[in-house]
Image (spheres, rainbow, N blue to C red):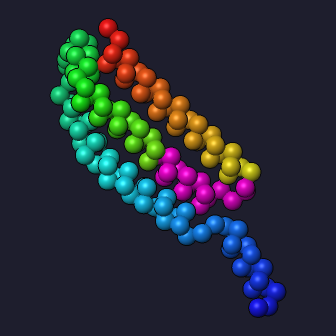
Amino acid sequence: MDTTQNNRMKKAHRLGGIKAGQHHWWLQRVTAIALIPLTLWVVFSLASLIGQDYRTVKIWFTLPHHTVLSVLFIVTAAYHASLGLQVIVEDYIHHLGIKQAVLITLRLLLILLGTLCTIVLLRLAFVP
């Protein structure tokens, strides 16, 4: 092997294997497929609550299957967003330090958003 090809092989080896990318690709597809019925359920369910008073909405959220599906939607949507934004950042930000800072910031913001939404939903469902 000549030196140039050897250097390219070393550089490519440090980038990681195909398995990490394949796993990421599958996770993004699985979460997207899971979001199809969850999003339809959320849209139609919330549309049925339009014009209802607070008490009716609160009673609706206290039903266990509504609470579970709502939390599942929030967690799945936040994780799917994290996966998608990670791909965008990795593809378009080339400076390693900036890329890592943006990825950490996005991940923390999505964790915070998902956690806050889940807490609000659970308080609505379980706090009288």
Residue nearer the viewer, 37 or 10: 10
Say how many tags the image has.
0
Q: Residue at x 28, y 42 (%)?
A: 38
Can residue 54 be found in the magenta stretch?
no
Q: Which residue is drawn at 74% across and 75% down?
A: 10
Residue 67 image point, x, y percent: 29, 27
Residue 118 image point, x, y percent: 41, 27
Residue 15 image point, x, y percent: 67, 67
Q: Is 16 drawn above or below residue 65 in the view shown?
A: below
Is residue 81 rendered to the left or right of residue 109?
left
Residue 25 image point, x, y percent: 46, 61
Name the residue furthest bottom.
1
Q: Is 33 drawn above or below residue 111 in the view shown?
A: below
In which quarter of the view is residue 1 placed? bottom right
In which quarter of the view is residue 4 placed? bottom right
Q: Is 17 drawn above or below residue 97 in the view shown?
A: below
Whether residue 57 is visible, yes or no, is no
Is residue 28 rendered to the left or right of residue 9?
left
Is residue 9 rendered to the left or right of residue 19?
right
Boundaries of the magenta span: 81-96
Residue nearer the viewer, 54 or 6: 6
Q: Main secondary structure of the magenta part?
A: helix
Whether residue 98 is visible, yes or no, is yes
